[in-house]
Amino acid sequence: MNLHEYQSKRRFEEFGIPVPHGRLAETPLEARLIAQELGSPVVVKAQVLTGGRGKAGGVKLARTLEEAETVAGQILGMNIRGHTVRKVLVDPAVTIRQEIYLGITNDRLARMPVIMCSAEGGMDIEQVNRERPEAIIREHINPLLGLRGYQINALAAGIELPYDLWRQFQRVAQGLYRCYTASDATLCEINPLVITGDGNLLALDGKMSIDDNSLFRHPDLAALRDTEAEPPEETKAREAGLSYVKLDGQIGCLVNGAGLAMATMDMTSIYGEADGIGPANFLDIGGGADAKTVAAALRIILADPNVKAILLNIFGGITRADEVARGVIQAFSEFETDIPKVVRLVGTNEQLGRQLLEEAHIPNMITATTLSEAAQKAVAAVKGA
């Protein structure tokens, strides 16, 4: 789950990281009133869960109250990379002497967090990493020891931070690490962390990603989820207890188990790569799914207009193949569709499951006995659509 900038910065503040004390506005008039309260100039910033806001015109300086109202009116309602701007953050403008990047994420290869810092803040850090990886200073953090002072000093020295700011930098970096661990975050990022005109550090922008699997421990953070900013299919899937991620392909994948889902996506990608065909989603119904769950999953897949074929790949362990078959029959009895359906059922009660599907006479249903065969048939079905 990703947090908006204003949510991330409020969270940062709880851990002692200095941030601008801006306010959120949903109308141009509210932006003007906030600017009046803060004192102009202000910066009006679109709050959408995507990057590239500045390049898209979603971040603007307003020198007067009238400008604050005008630019807020221009930004509200904008579409930035498929996200409609419904609120803006009005922050007091500050004089900037230097922009720095500071972030913490998981390094899966090293199996520990890594803190990264660069003097080239304010830029696309992925681009900096591709073109000038030496410009990013990294320190891995042993979770048993935590972030050590000498590591922060190494970051400060690596970006040639003025020595009189090292004490402030220690507090910011330690605060960011405490925020990262206390939130079960997968990413905590300040970009830019600026040196202001009066010689202090200030987090002008913030980004946080929270591990969805940890949200049961963080009801306060879970309540911050912006469901308007995510695909409606993902919201419906979460409400149904399903793991769903929308992708750009044409084959809707219904699978039980994350590993089997990844294998299914890989196989469809391999056989469909030459024709630009691939998975339209990651959907895992989990173990022990009943007919009702399977039907809910199929409804979500079929709601995606990009889906040209469905691949059901079920390995019946805890999940029984006959229950899956009943869910398929229930789903397709509710709505008619000509979309090809490739079904591979193996495991517990697989013979009964196949028998139920055969007797249901569902139009355009194709069976397969191996994953390789099922993936090839799904790709062929999309090509013939």
Image (tube, grey):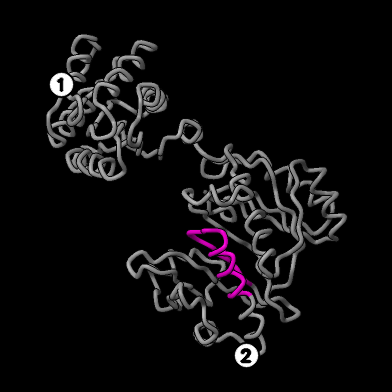
Q: Amino acid at mark 1?
A: Gln
Residue 75 picture location, percent across and down: 67, 45
Q: Nearer the viewer, residue 288 or 187?
A: 288
Residue 380 picture location, percent across and down: 17, 28
Q: Is residue 361 magenta?
A: no
* Above or below 174: residue 78: above
Question: Mark 1: which secondary structure?
Answer: helix
Magenta span of residues: 172-193
Q: Nearer the viewer, residue 329 or 253?
A: 329
Image quadrant holding the C terminus, namely top left
**Crowding at mark 2 (Cα within 10 Å: few <14, some 14-19, many 20+):** few
* Above or below 239: residue 175: below
In the displayed structure image, the side of residue 60 where residue 323 appears, left or right: left
Tell me the tag on residue 163.
2
- Please give the residue where the numbered disc 1 appears in the rendered image: 351
- Which residue is found at the position 20% from the left and 31% from the top? 379
Q: Is residue 190 magenta?
A: yes
Question: Mark 2: which secondary structure?
Answer: helix
Front: mark 2 or 1: 1
- Which residue is found at the position 31% from the left and 19% from the top? 328
